[in-house]
């Protein structure tokens, strides 16, 4: 039997692990089923401690079956400072005459858009994602990485700024996996084939998707 995706603490003896979908309340944050956050100190505060500067309309969208390690931070667009003039000082935020004179500058700043994380993405300890980044399905973000640019599917990145370390599979296998999209399978089917999903090949996953008429068109 699969764990209950609607429970906050899927491991009763370990409060440090939380499923995020039933925990997050902000309309600016969307998290898919079974994506979890692991933190020994305040895991339930993810929405407030790990999603920072979410002042604007931009959203954080995270897919299913993600694994997010302690200290992972998502910097949202509110962290941006104006850079079109001499100073980057945020006069507007302090209100009064400063805000009256500069509000249009801030509201007119270009946005990098939503931050989007695919399915089955693993974030290492204390990784950071900057505003507007898109991370593809099956990617791995190494511990301490500073992700400032988009990450292709099934790519391992690391460093500051994060750069590709290697691709997990060749292009044909990546296409097979994206077409199979196992994270969208019914939970019972995922449960039945959990061992293959963990240890099988892209061809194995593609075969199961084809057998159940679940392949997607890319």
Image (cartoon, rainbow, N blue to C red):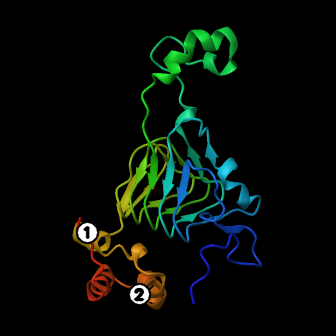
Left or right: 80, with 93 as reference point: left
Spot occupied by residue 199 in the image (x, y as percentages of width and height): 43, 84
Sooner in the amino-acid sequence: mark 2 or mark 1: 1
In this picture, is 28 found above or below 120?
Answer: above
Which residue bears the numbered disc 1? 175
Residue under the image location 53 percent in, 56 percent down? 30
| Quarter residue 84 falls in | top left
Q: Quadrant of the C terminus?
A: bottom left
Residue under the image location 63 percent in, 65 percent down? 22
| Quarter residue 75 falls in | top right
Q: How many marks?
A: 2
Q: Are marks 2 and 1 in contact (CB under 8 Å)?
A: no
Residue under the image location 31 percent in, 73 percent down? 177
Residue under the image location 69 percent in, 48 percent down? 48
Left or right: 63, with 13 as reference point: left
Q: Secondary structure at mark 1?
A: helix
Spot occupied by residue 31 in the image (x, y as percentages of width and height): 54, 60
Which residue bears the numbered disc 2? 196
Q: Nearer the viewer, residue 130 or 65?
A: 65
- Crowd tier of the residue under label 1, counting other residues whose Cα lies within 10 Å: few below 14, some 14–19, many 20 or above: some
Q: Secondary structure at mark 2?
A: helix
Q: Nearer the viewer, residue 54 or 80?
A: 54
Any mark on residue 114, and which?
Answer: none
Spot occupied by residue 133 in the image (x, y as percentages of width and height): 43, 46
In this picture, is 18 found above or below 142?
Answer: below
In this picture, is 114 found above or below 91?
Answer: below
Left or right: 90, with 192 as reference point: right
- Crowd tier of the residue under label 2, counting other residues whose Cα lies within 10 Å: few below 14, some 14–19, many 20 or above: some
Left or right: 73, with 155 as reference point: right
Spot occupied by residue 97 in the image (x, y as percentages of width and height): 66, 8
Q: CA distance from mark 2 to mark 1?
A: 18 Å
């Amino acid at each position: 039997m699969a764990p209950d995706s609607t429970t906050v603490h899927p491991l009763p003896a370990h409060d440090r692990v939380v499923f995020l979908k039933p925990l997050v309340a902000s309309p600016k944050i969307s998290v898919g089923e079974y994506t979890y956050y692991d933190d020994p100190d305040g895991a339930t505060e993810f929405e407030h401690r790990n999603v920072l500067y979410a002042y604007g309309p931009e959203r954080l969208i995270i897919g299913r079956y993600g694994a997010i390690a302690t200290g992972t931070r998502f910097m949202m667009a509110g962290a941006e400072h104006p850079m079109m003039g001499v100073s980057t000082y945020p006069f507007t935020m302090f209100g009064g005459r400063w805000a009256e004179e500069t509000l249009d500058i801030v509201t007119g700043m270009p946005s990098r858009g939503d931050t989007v994380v695919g399915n089955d993405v693993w974030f290492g300890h204390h990784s950071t994602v900057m505003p507007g980044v898109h991370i593809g399905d099956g990617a791995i973000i190494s511990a301490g990485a500073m992700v400032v640019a988009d990450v292709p599917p099934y790519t391992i990145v690391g460093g500051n700024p994060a750069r590709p370390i290697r691709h997990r599979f060749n292009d044909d296998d990546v296409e097979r996996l994206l077409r199979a999209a196992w994270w969208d399978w019914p939970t019972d089917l995922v449960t039945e084939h959990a061992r293959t999903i963990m240890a099988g090949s892209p061809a194995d996953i593609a075969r199961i998707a084809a057998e159940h008429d679940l392949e997607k068109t890319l």
